[in-house]
Image (cartoon, coloured by chain):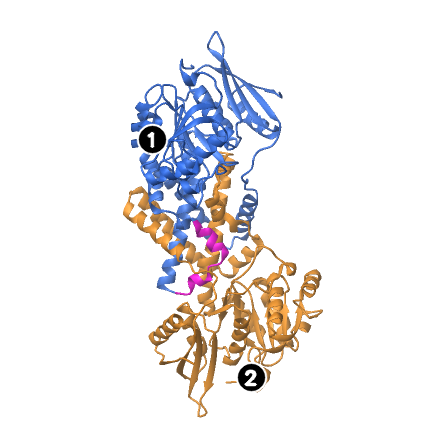
Chain colours: A orange, B blue
Amino acid sequence: MSDPDLAGHDTGPHAQRVAVIGTGLVGASIGLTVRRAGLAREITGYDVDADELDAAVEAGAVTHPASSAAEAAAGAEVVWLAVPASAVGAVAAEVGPAMLPGAVLTDAASVKTRVVELLQAAAPAQVHVIGGHPMAGSAETGAAAASAELFVGATWLLTPTTHTDPQAYRRLHGMIAAIGARVIAVAPQRHDLLVAVVSHLPQLAATTLMNLAADRARDEHAGLLLLAAGGFRDATRVAASNPDLWLDVCAQNRDAIVAVLDEYRDRIDALRTSLIKSDDARLRHELAAARSARRALPGKTVPEGALIELHLAIPDRPGVLADVTTTVGGAGVNIEDVTIEHAPEGGQGRLLLVLAGEAAAAAARQALEDRGFHVATERP
Amino acid sequence: MSDPDLAGHDTGPHAQRVAVIGTGLVGASIGLTVRRAGLAREITGYDVDADELDAAVEAGAVTHPASSAAEAAAGAEVVWLAVPASAVGAVAAEVGPAMLPGAVLTDAASVKTRVVELLQAAAPAQVHVIGGHPMAGSAETGAAAASAELFVGATWLLTPTTHTDPQAYRRLHGMIAAIGARVIAVAPQRHDLLVAVVSHLPQLAATTLMNLAADRARDEHAGLLLLAAGGFRDATRVAASNPDLWLDVCAQNRDAIVAVLDEYRDRIDALRTSLIKSDDARLRHELAAARSARRALPGKTVPEGALIELHLAIPDRPGVLADVTTTVGGAGVNIEDVTIEHAPEGGQGRLLLVLAGEAAAAAARQALEDRGFHVATERP
């Protein structure tokens, strides 16, 4: 299953050269972080905006600026596309043919199903595609705002599929873990359903609330927005986001967003019915449940606890890596490290997962056993 | 129209004695602020929770603790009820009969139509009822968290009605302006429609979003809430509010909330339709309009500009004060001071409004002229 090439050798997460295409806030922060962690000797970079590329070099995020995306990608073991979702297809088509056999092509777009399809269509057979989505950002934009701290403690989603090569996955996973982010594996389609809930719905709800209030202020009462206190300000903060970015997201994740908006509208309607009926028991339940859930919202934390290994006997077939890692991700558990060992006789292999802490190990084991895997636990 | 009693004498906003019933965060902050501004020599206070009353005395918010609400209210020229909306009726029934003729009875509840009805029902004929709602709060509660700064620059809504006595209104208005808040006059019913938009809808939208996400995390994907970044946290922050408080608000402002939820649900549905139809022009319009409106949201500011007087010839009839002040409030303009002069022959009087800055004066004048008033401007 491993390739007879550079990426096939297990060098851990370290690389000679990494490329960052798109050196805005996220791309430049990736470059800074990879460099600070000593994960690559050279960081090539390219941006369509020459000023952004200059700023990334200035910030120390790119060691070797290139004059095209293909030039930046040539010779890199990992190529990171940090461009808008709508640009991924064109950029991938340009860099794919220039990439080393065995190299990893990944991205940072906030939608994944369509983006991963485009990456796979653009990449030659020997290039390993793994979609990625760092859940970190900032109100600021551009390379000048880049920070090596941006991803520390943040969740970084990877979207392995049945085509994902285990060695390539391990390299990318290791690199992201080494820069301090928590890796959660999730299938591309599932990813898009999840972000529709936690990112796209909040955006569109804020947009709707802001427009409702602004229209009423204009049509009915100019003093309305003078009454806007902290709660309204919090609830509408993301409504100030860039419309172009969100049009892109809406286009790329239309089906998932529509499904979530359906449910949200139905829940608003049910709450309205409870109010009309003076169903205080129901209202109290909704208010109390939301309060508990909001208070329990996990923070941006670095997990603690001793490392624990789970060992799984696995059939040596494509897709088992994606199956195992997304099952563990579905339990909300970050995998610290992952290795596949192939049995010499073939047919049956062994997969090692490293997890941090007893609770994470227990949750992962349960989820894997529910899915039919046989799991042994070892405490190194 | 003026009364032959204490409040009828124009002493400006200054009083011998002010009472605060309910000495939690808001009540104790009122006491502190009134005292710091030198607006009253004595501040009597009462709270059903003896510890809260002790804390208010300790904080310097109450100079004369009383052993009952009626005892606190006796002899005060202004009585402030800072108790939950659901308690206003009972407390007003207790304090009303104890109050001085000509004194002002006001409150700080976040709903007004029902509360003002209860205040009016409880107050003797010679007591002047004016509903109030300071748009300021804090994540903290209790007298220990009270601050004389809480209301500086904040909007304080007053809800005059056709029954409102101009001298009493002027006294209360002057006291609130003197403590640094911006007074906006709005009719009680209109108040409740406005807060349904800027306060109650954001609360229920946050509750709904939080429950939708938490239910999906439980039923579908335990990792869901690990993906919750800043936008989700902001959008759901108020979902952690006290359920009892919000049940109270829902009960007191049911009709207005249902009407706003109707519109919100319809707007969510329209957005969903735009997504399904890939109506990018419509989506872009919604996203861009919300962005502009959010960026233009007025801050907690103290208005600047020279004081300008508007003089209005007014018919000497009940309700003209409420009509004028809520018309100006409807234009989003804070009135710095208000005086009614009655013509000796009766039948026609003159009303003076003091406004800060040319823009405020022009907006107020336009709104009043649209409503049929004749307005003359003077720059003192």
Which portion, as a residue range, is magenta? B221-237
Q: List x then y, in percent, for residue A274.
A: 31, 46
Foreground tag (1 vs 2) = 1
Q: Name the residue under label 1.
A: B66
Q: List x then y, in percent, for residue B137.
A: 44, 41
Task: Kindly tell me whether residue B322 is visible in this rendering.
Answer: no
At x 55%, y 27%, the residue is B364
The disc label shown at residue A248, or none: none
**Towards the viewer: A59 or B144:** B144
**Towards the viewer: B172 or A25:** B172
Q: Majority secondary structure of the magenta segment?
A: helix
Instruction: Locate residue B322: give its quadrant.
Output: top left
Task: Note whether B5 is above or below B195 in the view shown.
Answer: above
Q: Mark 1 and mark 2 in contact? Answer it, CB < 8 Å.
A: no
Q: Name the residue under label 2.
A: A8
Task: Note whether A206 is above or below A328 in the view shown.
Answer: above
